[in-house]
Image: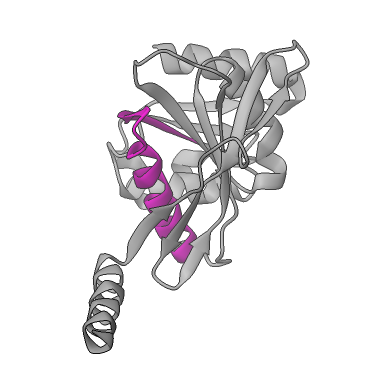
Amino acid sequence: MKKALQVLGVLFILVLGGLGVFLFTKKGPENQQVVKTEEGVKVATEPLSFYIKDRVINGQVYHLDRDTTSKKKTAVVYCQSMEHGASWCKELASQGLVAYCFDFTATDLKTKVKELKEVVKQVGNLRYVDSSKVYVLGEGDGCHTACSYTFNNPGKPAGLMLLSPGFNPLEISFRAKHYRGQILVIDETLGHKSAISEILEYIEK
């Protein structure tokens, strides 16, 4: 019996190793928090993390509290960090979107692009998200990562949005000239509300 359990344990580890990437999250009232926007809209948030081989991508997902609609949602992956993304994700979720922010484990662009690629895939796999409507929103250093990922994976994100990138996104990669999607560049100095309105208008096109 003991040997059989050991064999099962080894097989389990091998299966997880073969998959390379899997999602883990703890759902339930004890892990979910409800926060309010300035307008008083209740938004639910809970941790949502991914294993990528030997690394763990830690993140936070935001959505409307007590949303009973069965229709799959459009999602926005905020690309920089949880610290900077929390306020953006809260506001986006208050508009009926699913929003996700996370912390990169890497510092080099190549690995960060790989991590973002997996995050977009896993967010699209959530049962309440429409996998064909996952957008990427970059800010700060995340703009370079968002651009590099999008230009190297055309058609994967539903769209590319950049918060005050400080550079011309079409000049950072030779692959950019092959990108046929529309890029939304947002001037953050106009304020959160204006930026959120631009994002919603872009998504609804």
Q: Quadrant of residue 38?
A: top right
Magenta stretch containing residue 127, yes or no? yes
Looking at the rendering, in which quadrant would you find the N terminus? bottom left
Residue range corresponding to the magenta coloring? 111-136
In-image side of 115 versus 44 (left or right): left
In-image side of 201 versus 142 (left or right): left
Q: Could you tell me residue 78's position as x and y percent?
A: 55, 39
Q: Where 119 sits versus 193, above or below?
A: below
Which residue is painted at 64% across and 48% down in the image? 81
**Farthest-out residue, bottom:** 3
Which residue is painted at 57% across and 23% down in the image? 93
In-image side of 39 versus 91 (left or right): right
Count up the numbered dots.
0
Which residue is painted at 71% across and 42% down in the image? 84
Q: Could you tell me residue 32's position as x and y percent?
A: 61, 36
Q: Where 32 sits versus 195, above or below?
A: below
Query: From this viewpoint, is residue 150 visible?
Result: no
Q: Where 181 sits versus 198, above or below?
A: below
Q: Where 125 sits versus 63, above or below?
A: below
Magenta stretch containing residue 125, yes or no? yes
Q: Quadrant of residue 154?
A: top left
Q: Could you tell me residue 85's position as x and y percent?
A: 65, 39
Query: From this viewpoint, is residue 52 visible?
Result: yes
Q: Quadrant of residue 12?
A: bottom left
Which residue is painted at 30% across and 46% down in the image? 153
**Farthest-out residue, front:** 1
Specify how the rendered protein is coloured.
one colour
Q: Could you tell me residue 205's position as x and y percent?
A: 39, 11
